[in-house]
Amino acid sequence: MSSSVAEHPAASDDFSIVGKSVKELRALGDHRHLSLNDAEWAAVQAHFKLLKREPSLAEIETIAQTWSEHCKHKIFTSPIRYTEGRKTRTIKNLFQETIVAATEALQKPWCLSVFEDNAGVISFGKKWALAFKAETHNPPSALEPYGGAATGVGGVVRDILGCGLGAKPVLNTDVFCFGRPDYKGFLPEGAHHPVRTLRGVVAGVRDYGNRMGIPTAGGGIWFDDDYRLNPLVFCGTVGLLPQWAVKKEVKPGDLIVAAGGRTGRDGLHGATFSSAVLGADAPSSAVQIGHAIIEKRVLDALLRARDRRLYRSVTDCGAGGFSSAVGELAARCGARVRLEAAPLKVSDLESWEIWLSESQERMVLAVPAKNLKALEAVFAAEGCETAVIGEFTRTGRLEVLHHANAVVDLDMKFLHKGLPRIEREAVWNAPSATKPSGGADKKLSQALKEAVGHLNVCSREWVIRQYDHEVQGGTVIKPLQGVRHDGPGDACVIWPHTATGDMDDFSGFSVAHGLNPEYGRFDPYWMALACVDEALRNLTCVGADPSRAALLDNFCWASPEDPKQLGALVRAAEGCRDAAKGFAAPFISGKDSLYNQSKDEKGRELPIPGTLLISAIATIPDTRKALTMDFKGPGNALYLIGRTNDEMGGSLYHRLLGRAGGEVPKVCPVTALDGFKSLHAAILKGLVLSAHDLSDGGLAVAATEMGFSGEFGCLVDLDEMPRDPRIYSNETLLFSESPSRILIEIKPEDEGSFLRHFGKAAKAAAVRRIGQTTANPIFKVVGLDGSTILEESLRELKEGWQKTLPAMLA
Amino acid sequence: MSVRPLPLLTHLIEVRLRPEFTDAEGAGALMLLQGSGLSSIKETRVCRLYEIKGPLSGNQVQQAAKDLLCDGVTQEFRVLSPSHAPLNGMNFWRVEVWLKPTVTDPVGETVRSAVAEMGLPRPDSVRCALVYRLVGRSTKPQIEKAFSKSLANLLIHRCVVSEAHP
């Protein structure tokens, strides 16, 4: 019989907490990178006082990682006393009251699994489902860009493998936020220059995705010097699984089987690291190096075992390692684990290190004993190691033994429900509306050249070409488009039926993103709506159905201990709620990464701008009707969908001019959705030749990109734009970033059908013909007074658009 | 008759591009080093170094290098002595970038399995390093500094800088 934790001196002597002062506990936590706050220490202390024993080191580490920000999202689930202006209210649970509330209100029957598994799941046809998840891997990527980003991809791929009974990854997407590559200032010791971070992150994503044979076909990059110490790396994956495999369950008596990579000393404290501010004392042990080939073996074996229904449940070993994976699977029953059975990389690991290690490429399965031999054979055939490390019980306890010594014996209820909920203060003061001021006007031609060559607009070909976006043979709409395959696409379209084997099914799906932290500097609420709007209009542009779109949220914020930061976070979350309801697009999963701030070269705290990434997925009824954004020929009509307002706050144009103030773009979801739905129907009818969304740089940049991608010019008359009649400025009409607008190209003979199709919207002047395409690749604009105000060679504009990033990296 | 197992030995195999081929990886490394302040370096070539520990004989190591680690068309290899002492070569430098022992080495792990799959004795461990051969006047501290800014992350890497053969 095994000894209890209390009886085992080696396990408990090293970690005495009962009777220790707050200061002593803090020092203990700092020393071991536990990231427990005073209230959490008090709860742990009280628990063990009640048990009349000291905890073991493994128990404290287990509690710390289970209660980490990474695993429990405690800021989003704890009460917040929120003050906005003169009004104060208490938010009991921000996550439930915003993100979850919107999804529950929408009641979409095609949402098969939301917020409960490793990824959100929506239906795809009658037999299949799509699992979608995007994760951040920020601190690891700041410390070691290549390894951090690679394991970010590996981690999110395992989330998809561990969703339901396992999904086959069919698409990777990646979005990054970096400091400017031409940053010339000093950096604190240990920080990498943004160029190095960029190169390493791109290489990491490239190598892991390419080696696993998953197409990386979507994403984006945002540059801002406030990310120079805390780069953001969002890795997303879409997986395909049969609908019968969406649900999973663990039964007491099932064996706990570890499969995949061996356990080593790498990646310790990754979960608790997420609750800490990045500094020079960051633990090097938090860095992992991935092994894509092992994960590919796990993938192949797992899906084969799934189809033979050899296991009942599965999850990945992510942050927290076995402790998190087993703890999650056993949350409703209990588990007994024997650590000596785990395959190790090195033999001198301590018990807590085996239990907590975040070594990559490991999965944990719940396997009925009768299926064990068959399961082992399937994994062995792929050269993939498996080991039975314990069994699920009905005790409601998490029991971990190492060579017959008990190292963990915790009540599941305490572990998962014992986290104290601490009320935090949040403050939001709406910035007073200010008229645009400062900066000097530029010639329109100069402004356009600078806009297309701007870091946040310019070509990403240097990055995209490193990724294999064709592997699996289903990438219908590719990230680079146009006659020379180098134009900026709005979204990718994937036909995943090489995986289902149904070659006569032409349905597919599309994934797009929305991100603009610049708007968040004005108001995070409107930033959230703009991000959702951008993601959905990107989907619409390629032919996806906006009424079948599901969303992921990814909040990356600075320290929520600062009431202003937390207030902004509340604003953004409420924006997400209203956007989801307004667009009838449910959130199905999400993630938050907080404490993204570091001390800069002068020792001052440098927080990142509050950043929200919205990732959207939608099905496409017929991928043969999917669209690219390049002009298709001369003499075609150009229509603009959506009204242009004087919304230059946070715009690219204002940043080019160094101008402050102005109105941040404001979204009206209901009107926007009407326009998106009508456009989608028009695309299905074959009435649209190309479509491109208006985002950074507004109409001027969108028309330029469509022109140089198709190598046709265009003539645009600003007076024809659907707009606020109070606008008298050509610059505003060209560069305003009013949301929900899409520029489309239509054959002249289809104009009548198109206008009849749009009906009321056309009459309400929200859809207007604003010009036409031309054979000569020149972008020509007629201003409000009827004179030509801009006439620029698209070839030259394209050169400027293409050279920015390579020039900076060279 | 029982075969007496070979004692554990450490073998170093260096694999590099034949000199007649353009070394794109080396050119990229040179650009990064020059961008990190090492403007005096005029040429960089990159090779791989495998440290194999285990009961392999000299012939078996040669076989692993020839059939597994080296592409005979574009690459060549040599087996180094673990205590190889490079000659002084004024303007020639050799920088080995190793993953620290506590960091997972996926390439090394794959090579270890692949050696065993060839029917050779399974090595106890294989670690892989990148070797940069630099041509240009510089000093060891300057090289170390430039590498720490560009090609090595000292959080996970160990850099060994030495003067080398021309």
Image (cartoon, helix red, strand yellow):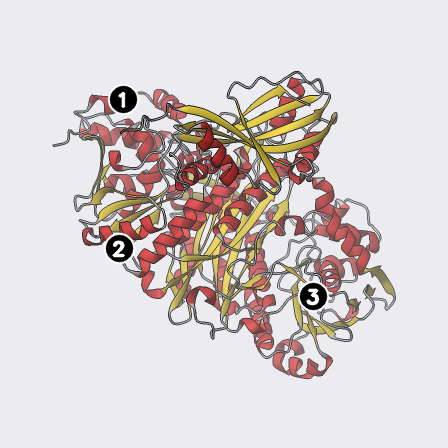
| Disc 3 residue type (three-letter) | Asp
Give how far apart the Cα atoms at labels 1 and 3 are: 67 Å
User: Which residue matches tag 3?
Assistant: A630
Vertical arrangement, residue A518 with respect to residue A100, above or below = above
Q: Position of residue B86 (x, y in %)?
A: 61, 18
Query: Hey, what amino acid is under mark 2?
Result: Arg
- Image quarter where the N terminus of chain A lies is top left
Q: Earlier in the sequence, mark 1 or mark 3?
A: 1
Q: Is residue A650 visible?
A: no
CB atoms of marks 1 and 2 within 8 Å: no
User: Which circle, 1 or 3, is nearer the viewer?
Assistant: 3
Label 2: chain letter: A
Residue at the spot 46% in from the left edge and 40% down from the top edge: A290
Q: Residues within 10 Å of mark 1 (few under 14, many from 20)?
A: some
Name the residue tied to disc 2: A312
**Residue A104, percent from left and from top:** 38, 61
Q: Are marks 2 and 3 on the same chain?
A: yes
Specify the quadrant of the image occupied by residue A542.
bottom right
- Name the secondary structure under disc 1: loop
Does A592 sit left or right of A637 as displayed? left
Q: Regarding mark 2 in the picture, which secondary structure is present there?
A: loop
The reply to whether callout 2 and callout 3 are in contact (CB within 8 Å) is no
Q: For mark 3, name the chain.
A: A
Which residue matches tag 1? A16
Residue A177 picture location, percent across and down = 59, 44
